[in-house]
Amino acid sequence: MGAGPIDGWDRAVDVLVAEASHGRFWAASGAAVESAVLGGLVGAVRWLTTPLFPEDYLSLVNPLWCGRELRGRIEAIHAETADAATLVIRPGRGWIPHKPGQWVRIGVDIEGARHWRTYSLSGPPGRPDGCITITVKAVPDGLVSRHLVRQAAPGTIVELAGPDGSFVLPEPPPRRLLFLTAGSGITPVRAMLHGLLTPAAARGGAKPRVADVVLLHSAPTSADVIFGAELRALTARFPNLRLYERHTRTEGRLRPGDLPDLCPDWAERTAWVCGPAGMLQEAEEHWAGSLDRLHVEHFRPVLPRAGGEGGRVRFTKSGRETDAEGGTPLLIAGEDAGVLMPSGCRMGICHSCVGRLTSGQVRDLRTGQIHGEAGDLVQTCVSAAVGPVEIEL
Ligand SMILES: Cc1cc2nc3c(=O)[nH]c(=O)nc-3n(C[C@H](O)[C@H](O)[C@H](O)COP(=O)(O)OP(=O)(O)OC[C@H]3O[C@@H](n4cnc5c(N)ncnc54)[C@H](O)[C@@H]3O)c2cc1C
Ligand code: FES
């Protein structure tokens, strides 16, 4: 005989008591307590609510309590420059604290379709309000960046994927660092700077964790420097931070050849570089003999123009087809054909865009290599059709 409602309630209470007796409620604090209590409730109530899950009811009360997917709520949006804004996001249950320099994937609904993009977390972990921040520069013609900067509003729920990325500082950090950034490339470095500098100040002037930081940052004008006022204030406050701003509209681009003048001991420092592809390529050439001292973060894929014939691509699940050129990623071909393509970083690092090949072969646009057998998973953001292709998407 199945359990009646009274039995059911008793069992739910039993589970809650068991959770509490294991110290799960009381060992935690703040957001952790909320999470533990919700976890206990969910465990206790899950069987009562079958076939619907308790997460389904909880997420009706508060979308951030959804247990099936990690969500966040945009709490505030602050303009940084004419075309960049910082979004303060409260992550829901399941968020894992990030390391300064890491990025997050964010799913944003625009006109009924969810679009995934990747943004560096622009602050260090551990904000007192439990929120995280991303700072987005609106790209001309950019779908998601323009939406986030110009249209998104506080209260909007977005989907998140946990933090990731290896553009981070080692522990302990080197004594002397060089940051070379341009445009929105400042965002991961801003998180690192705060991680390095501000905890010392918060401890009442304790010895800084880093002896000497040089930041060389480029933007078209002074007004275009994202976090400009804050960076200048940090420089005034911390003698171990030196900032050089290059305003490219009047002074031209900063080139690696400028480094000896701006930072004479650049070769003895470990460098973190983030900016446009051209700048990253020049940095890699400049540090060619000492790449162990160079860390770069790309915001866009570097896809050499791989030739190739392209081909007819059939997306088997959605039943759509299109002719794709040999240099066009299957991701773009699918999106242009109206297929709801999963994606994230759009540059081959997060693996959230994979689809299973049913037939045909693809070219890896990063290396030019042709590969693929039926059943293989391919990253659609960096793969193009070589002849006719069928993919389970
Ligand atoms: C690891 C990582 C971290 C990132 N961090 C940040 C960040 O902190 N802040 C931020 O603003 N962006 C960041 N980006 C870039 C971001 O993910 C998007 O690529 C960018 O916002 C453009 O998306 P979109 O939808 O507006 O453009 P799309 O609609 O995808 O593209 C529209 C047009 O813009 C071009 N385009 C695409 N991306 C860029 C770009 N990055 N710069 C210039 N042109 C582009 C495309 O080629 C296309 O022509 C990061 C990317 C990665 C991979
Ligand atoms: S979207 Fe990240 S690997 Fe393709």
Image (cartoon, helix red, strand yellow):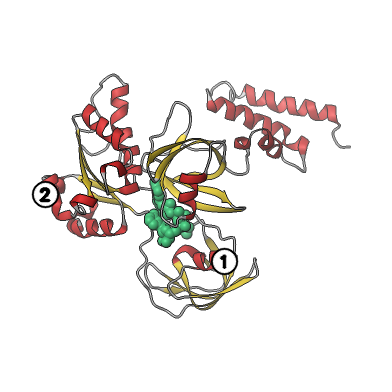
Amino acid carrying mark 1 in the image: Arg
Residue at 65% x, 29% y is 40
Residue 44 in the image, given as x and y percentages of width and height: 71, 31
Q: Is residue 265 left or right of residue 147?
A: left
Residue at 30% x, 33% y is 230
- The part of the image, by quadrant, that contains residue 11 is top right
Say which element carries label 2.
helix
Closer to the camera: disc 2 or disc 1? 2
From the viewer's side, name the closer residue of 111 and 128: 111
Residue 70 in the image, given as x and y percentages of width and height: 56, 42
Residue 3 in the image, given as x and y percentages of width and height: 84, 33
Amino acid carrying mark 2 in the image: Pro
- Numbered circles on residues, count: 2
Q: Earlier in the sequence, mark 2 or mark 1?
A: 2
Location of mark 2 (residue): 260
Residue at 15% x, 47% y is 266
Disc 2 crowd rating (10 Å Cα; few below 14, some 14-19, many 20+) is few
Q: Is residue 362 visible?
A: yes
From the viewer's side, name the closer residue of 172 and 286: 286
Marks 2/1: CA–CA distance: 50 Å
Vertical placement of 237 versus 343: above or below? Answer: above
Residues tagged 2 and 1 counted as in contact (Cβ below 8 A): no
The quarter of the rendered structure image containing the N terminus is: top right
